[in-house]
Image (tube, grey):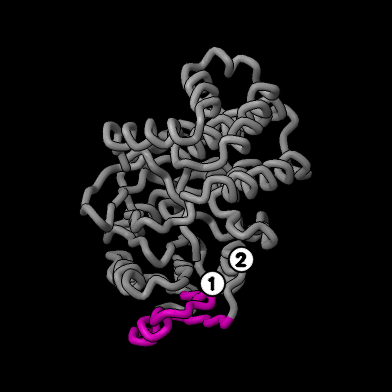
Amino acid sequence: MTADPTVSVILNCYNHEAYVGEAIESVLGQMFRDLELIIIDNGSTDGTRAVLERYDDPRIRRFFHDENQSLSKRLNEGVAAARGEFVAVLYSDDWMLPDKLERQVPLLRGLPASVGAVYSPATGFNQRTGKVWQHQSMAKQYATLRTLLQNWSEGALDMSSPLTRRECFERYRWHEDVFSDGEGIFLRVAMHWSLQFDSKPTVVLRDHGSNMGKAVQRNHDMLMVILDRLETHADFPNDCTNDLKNFRADVCRKHAWSTLRVGGSAVWARAQLRRAIKLRPRLLTKPRTLAAIGLAALPNTIRLRLNRLGNRLTDRPENRTFVENY
């Protein structure tokens, strides 16, 4: 490894003893070799640390923590330690495909400096069933903040597929008081840089049943904080104000529906539906909004029966997007 590798891969780990070895090996086995692997253990209490210590490769740098703190803080620590021109983030239950960096490094180097990252669709993998699918992805070229806000429903960016210029994460840090700022950082990056889509999948996201993305209300609250701060940021473009308002409305409706579908609080869901309609009245013309209103009005026992029936009829994990917990 050179003193200053081309790529710094930040691997965040927390209680993934069964999976983290595969994540590490996917990085060390990259066809592109000029990299460093920054492993940050976020206070694991299982056998994760023992797995991390098994690997002997000069490209590895390890940082162990006794306390589990915000993922956002650990990501900032990883960027501060990074020496690479580019940064890739990986979570300890996912893995990179072998040609990820070999493909993305020349792509990003060949683009103007105004492009901050290249991203791709992610492959999903169900640990229980072995089912594989491709996550929906926003296939946009030179995407700006406005592009992201208007098209996020086509498929949000995941945290592990992009390769990003390190300076993007130095200019826009993760909010450390938000446990999992995660992909929200790309909304800030897109205020100054554009993002470029590449159609070839580069990572696999594992669904093992306990992914943090299923904690809908918690994730919603974190995203609302991120959006509030985005709007007050000095770099926020004034011509995106209405797009952000519509984005908030769409998120409130989507999370209300998700909460109702997983048996969550109907009271909370109704509050989000009211907020969504107030922000964007035209949502009342959308079938999904009307369905959510109807579902929220049903007694809990009936709603649970309908959800069980719906789950049997439409079990489609390829439509799920998860934000991992570390």
Q: Position of residue 251 (x, y in %)?
A: 57, 34
**Residue 70's quadrant in the figure?**
bottom right
Q: Is residue 140 visible?
A: yes
| 76 sits left or right of 195 in the view | right
Q: Position of residue 118 (x, y in %)?
A: 45, 47
| 93 sits left or right of 241 in the view | left
Pick whichever, 196 or 147, lies toward us: 147
Q: Which residues are magenta?
A: 39-66
Q: Residue at x 33, y 52 (%)?
A: 202
Where residue 83 is drawn, which disc sits there? 1
Amino acid on which disc 2 is placed: Ser
Q: Residue at x 54, y 23 (%)?
A: 293
The stretch drawn in magenta includes residue 53: yes
Q: Residue at x 28, y 52 (%)?
A: 125
Where residue 320 is drawn, which disc sits there? none
Amino acid on which disc 1 is placed: Arg
Q: Are marks 2 and 1 in contact (CB under 8 Å)?
A: no
Where residue 70 is drawn, which disc sits there? 2
> Is the residue marked by circle 2 packed among few (<14), some (14-19), or many (20+) residues within 10 Å?
some
Q: Position of residue 109 (x, y in %)?
A: 45, 52
Q: Residue at x 35, y 82 (%)?
A: 51
Pick whichever, 175 or 289, lies toward us: 289
